[in-house]
Amino acid sequence: MPRQLWLRGKYLIRQAACQADLIAAQSLRAQAFRSANDDGLDCDVFDERCLHFLVIEAATGTLVCCFRLLPLQDGREISSSYSAQYYELTALESYPHRMAELGRFCIRPGYGDPDIIRVAWGAMTTYVDESGIGLLFGCSSFAGTETKDYLDTFAMLQARHLAPPRWLPRIKAPDVFRFAARLRRKPDVKKAMMRMPPLLRTYLLMGGWVSDHAVVDRNMNTLHVFTGLEITAIPPARKKLLRAVAGQGSGASGGSIYEKMIGGR
């Protein structure tokens, strides 16, 4: 995709072009995840293999969001992904198409504008289309490690959004919450949606699915579920809206497109 992609509205997105860009992303990640090393950065061995994207507030130049994408040729390479550290992904090794792992998605604390996610998804859509990606996947994180805070959300995931059996990730991490096996409650949908992370919510509204368990990651102070989105499963109307976001320069307002894309707030 182009190194810089201007999108209508208050934000632009571009791919990191130099070490300073990467450091800026790692610094924002450290703030969002509270995972700084001695240098005040959040970094790991996967950074050098990934494409890094920056969402910038055009008026101020402030970096408000970042994420990274790790491209893989097909399922045979999935064992080299970040997610494979925490999930047994043998089932996905037979996936025959190109894949991309979405990781370290974060928004600057204090910035709640939903257009930020709209812009990010527009960029991801451009990359997916241009690269022929068949499956977008990654770890979707919940803040904190207290499972009781998210029981309605996990119950809804169990009832509606589990991965197809042929792709279902198995348990690998030592500390997990097996919500699909343990929860039999009927979810309060309103509470479930209120507690659901925005990124996961958007994945699911596009037709995504999750693992049957959550990993308790005390180092990052998060719970996370493996999340997959098969591009061919995205409903045509939502796919059309995503592409409108990715290529928009005129027409409907960004807010209206975003609300249609995620089905309202």
Image: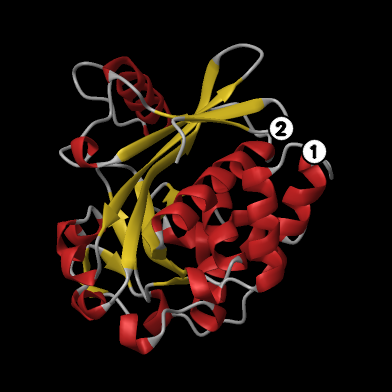
Q: Helix or strand or loop: what does disc 2 sit on?
A: loop
Let me know if residue 173 appears in the view: no
Q: Residue furthest bottom?
A: 165
Q: Amino acid at mark 1?
A: Ser
Q: Residue 45 appears in which quarter of the rendering?
A: top left
> Which residue is at 68% across, 34% downward?
113
Q: Which residue is mark 2?
A: 8
Q: Amino acid at mark 2?
A: Arg
In front: mark 1 or mark 2? 1
Instruction: Locate residue 242 relative to residue 142 in the image: left or right.
Output: right
Instruction: Locate residue 137 relative to residue 242 in the image: left or right.
Output: left
User: Badge 2: few (under 14), some or many (20 or more) residues near its Cα, within 10 Å?
Assistant: some
Most foreground residue, 213 or 82 = 82
Instruction: Specify which label sits upstream in the sequence, 1 or 2.
Output: 2
Residue 250 numbered tag: 1
Q: x and y percent of residue 223 in the render? A: 37, 55
The answer to whether the residue labelled 1 contacts the one labelled 2, judged by CB atoms less than 8 Å apart, is yes
Q: x and y percent of residue 110 in the render? A: 60, 26
Instruction: Locate residue 16 relative to residue 150 in the image: left or right.
Output: left
